Image (spheres, helix red, strand yellow):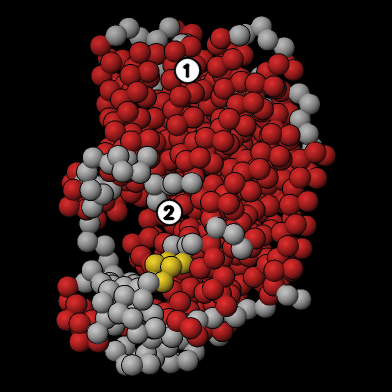
């Protein structure tokens, strides 16, 4: 069957399934809308959490960054998986035992302050909106390819789909939809990876293929890839990082940001018992590991296939570069989206793809008659384009399109759920209009979700980076604001409301200021105050890695202010003690 028709069928069927589930499991009460009635089994919740977690950044962008950055992109693997361990051990069980619906609700009650709750809501919305921008970028990439439209049009179409099923189902509908989306995305990720690993290395498992031999040359795959990229002036694929401080801070920011992400934390509020929260975290790691251990192989093999296509002959030979008129169909398809661009700078009709910023390679490039790199490849297309580049069957390509959409939509729905619950439950019901009816509260939740979708779509049209980079910014914001407040709220009886409020404000404002200086104010293009280069960064720390510094500022300010002011009331200190005591862990407090 022709690819476009098959893609419509596969993607259409998956969407019909998601929307059908959303209407079947439509939330009718606030308990179902916010926490799915607290009746989700840990295995099912682990699968839903994995889908919630493995966003467009994981499915679409992470392997693309690994493909182009090699070893340096391992910070995403280390940070995101390590953060889940922190979440399982230090936060999830205690927050579930506290028994509230939302993260701001916990912060407001623990720090006995409606102001603290409002500040937490503001931090949550900032983190979640930033995160959704990355998902909208992924949605745009996936829709643009399978509908063969430009990325902006694809983003707007995807926005409408998200609005339709997320607003209807609430947490109950989102949970069951995410279970279906996990099944789709994991099949879509692993099936082509197995095909390509077999083709390039003869290994069925891409995890083994990454360290196996390249079938055509007999040399180790990574060695072969190192030779190919260095021949064109790029850094070695396996080269170590030159800035270990930045790599450490980046990893730390992603780790503690993971543990502070509200849309992930609220998934642990949907299980019946505290012990189930720990089991949810364990099962989530199992389901996540399937994709995360596959991603390095996918990234390396995608880079190999791209280089073999563009540079099929010897470097510098007249016929060494791909002739533009002879470009394959996948190249033409992605050109339609605007995410793959060619500019014939030397007018020879062939594609020169090399590192034109390398001083060492410049002399060779001049000898070859090359006038600069002629190919612009958006990192976010690599996973979706990889099966086409490898000439896999059409049904595999269609499956990957469905998987990319499932990954982006599942996380977008979870983030929107976190935003809507914060606005309706914490701001409206919990603070400003406590006497509103349950029906009115649900209305506020759905309206706020719709507004958040529109804002994210608008910002997604001009994202401040690739999907994974935008998501990393969100993790940094969560690391600098929410994670310290949760940690101190659970493990320190001395932190009072003033300390928590000033700590959160200091953490998120310092991180936002640093990000905006390099990425532009409110991510508006052309408003950056400093060039976003390593030389300009404070101690070489990238904006995506600054969340760890922001967290340190948060902790320091919170402890300093708390030490200079009165102790929390005795009942709050007793509350903190009761949260940490294992006794009673078999059952959690209900709302």
Does dot 1 land on a helix, a strand or a loop? helix
Q: CA distance from mark 2 to mark 1?
A: 31 Å
Circles 2 and 1, Cβ within 8 Å, touching? The answer is no
Q: Is residue 62 left or right of residue 565?
A: right
In the image shown, does 455 or 555 lie closer to the viewer? 455
Number of numbered discs present? 2
Residue shown at the point (29%, 89%) measured from the top left:
316
Is residue 332 visible to us here? yes
Residue assigned mark 2: 466
Does dot 2 land on a helix, a strand or a loop? loop
Residue 29 figure quarter = top right
Q: Is residue 436 left or right of residue 373?
A: right
Q: Compared with residue 453, is residue 118 higher up or lower down, i.e. above or below?
A: above
Tell me the quadrant of the picture where the N terminus can be found. bottom right
* Residue 118's disc number: 1
Residue shown at the point (44%, 13%) measured from the top left:
115
Q: Position of residue 236 (x, y in %)?
A: 29, 74
Q: Compared with residue 524, is residue 365 higher up or lower down, i.e. above or below?
A: below
Q: Position of residue 124 (x, y in %)?
A: 48, 29
Residue shown at the point (48%, 11%) measured from the top left:
114
For disc 1, the neighbor class at 10 Å (few under 14, some 14 to 19, many from 20) is many
Q: Residue furthest front?
A: 347
In the image shown, does 261 or 543 lie closer to the viewer? 543
Q: Compared with residue 273, is residue 19 higher up or lower down, i.e. above or below?
A: below
Residue shown at the point (31%, 88%) measured from the top left:
315
Q: Position of residue 342 (x, y in %)?
A: 41, 71
**Given this view, does label 2 or label 1 mark the residue nearer the observer?**
2
Q: Is residue 520 left or right of residue 482?
A: left
Q: Compared with residue 67, is residue 449 higher up or lower down, i.e. above or below?
A: above
Is residue 263 visible to us here? no
For disc 2, the neighbor class at 10 Å (few under 14, some 14 to 19, many from 20) is many
Which of the two discs, 2 and 1, labels the residue nearer the N terminus? 1
């Amino acid at each position: 069957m022709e690819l476009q028709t098959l893609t419509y069928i596969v993607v259409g069927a998956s969407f019909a399934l998601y929307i059908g589930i959303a209407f079947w499991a439509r939330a009718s009460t606030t308990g179902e809308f916010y926490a799915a009635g607290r009746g989700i089994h840990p295995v099912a919740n682990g699968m839903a959490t994995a889908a919630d977690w493995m966003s467009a950044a994981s499915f679409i962008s992470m392997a693309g960054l690994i493909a182009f950055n090699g070893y340096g992109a391992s910070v995403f693997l280390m940070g995101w998986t390590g953060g889940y361990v922190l979440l399982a051990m230090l936060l999830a069980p205690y927050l579930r035992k506290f028994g509230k619906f939302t993260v701001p609700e916990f912060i407001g009650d623990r720090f006995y302050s409606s102001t603290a709750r409002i500040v937490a809501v503001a931090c949550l919305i900032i983190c979640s909106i930033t995160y959704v921008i990355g998902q909208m970028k992924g949605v745009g990439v996936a829709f643009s390819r399978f509908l063969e439209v430009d990325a902006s049009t694809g983003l707007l179409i995807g926005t409408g789909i998200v609005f339709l099923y997320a607003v209807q189902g609430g947490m109950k509908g989102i949970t069951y939809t995410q279970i279906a989306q996990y099944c789709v995305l994991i099949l879509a990720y692993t099936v082509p990876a197995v095909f390509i690993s077999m083709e390039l290395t003869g290994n069925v498992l891409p995890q083994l293929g990454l360290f196996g031999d390249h079938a055509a040359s007999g040399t180790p795959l990574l060695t072969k890839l190192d030779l190919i990229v260095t021949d064109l002036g790029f850094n070695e694929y396996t080269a170590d990082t030159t800035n270990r401080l930045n790599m450490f801070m980046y990893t730390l920011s992603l780790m503690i940001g993971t543990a502070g992400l509200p849309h992930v934390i609220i998934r642990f509020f949907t299980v019946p018992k505290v012990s189930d929260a720990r089991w949810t975290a364990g099962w989530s790691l199992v389901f996540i590991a399937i994709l995360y251990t596959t991603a390095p192989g996918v990234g390396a093999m995608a880079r190999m296939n791209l280089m073999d296509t563009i540079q099929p002959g010897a470097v510098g030979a007249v016929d060494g570069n791909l002739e533009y008129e002879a470009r394959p169909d996948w190249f033409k398809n992605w050109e339609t989206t605007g995410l793959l661009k060619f500019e014939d700078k030397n007018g020879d009709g062939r594609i020169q793809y090399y590192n034109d910023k390398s001083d060492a390679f410049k002399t060779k490039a001049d000898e070859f008659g090359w006038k600069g790199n002629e190919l612009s490849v958006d990192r976010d297309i690599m996973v979706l384009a990889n099966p086409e580049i490898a000439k896999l069957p059409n049904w595999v390509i269609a499956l990957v399109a469905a998987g990319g959409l499932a990954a982006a939509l599942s996380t977008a729905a979870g983030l929107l759920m976190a935003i809507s619950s914060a606005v309706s439950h914490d701001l409206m019901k919990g603070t400003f209009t406590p006497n509103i009816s349950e029906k009115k509260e649900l209305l506020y939740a759905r309206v706020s979700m719709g507004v958040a979708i529109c804002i994210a779509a608008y910002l997604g049209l001009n994202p401040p980076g690739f999907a994974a980079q935008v998501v990393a910014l969100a993790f940094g914001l969560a690391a600098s604001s929410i994670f310290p407040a949760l940690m101190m709220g659970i493990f320190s009886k001395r932190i009072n409301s003033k300390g928590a409020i000033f700590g959160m404000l200091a953490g998120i404002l310092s991180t936002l200021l640093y990000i905006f200086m390099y990425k532009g104010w409110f991510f508006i293009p052309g408003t950056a105050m400093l060039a976003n280069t390593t030389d300009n960064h404070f101690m070489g720390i990238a904006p995506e890695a600054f969340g760890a510094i922001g967290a340190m500022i948060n902790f320091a300010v919170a402890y300093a202010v708390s030490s200079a002011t009165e102790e929390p009331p005795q009942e709050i200190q007793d509350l903190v003690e009761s949260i940490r005591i294992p006794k009673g862990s078999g059952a959690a407090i209900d709302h």
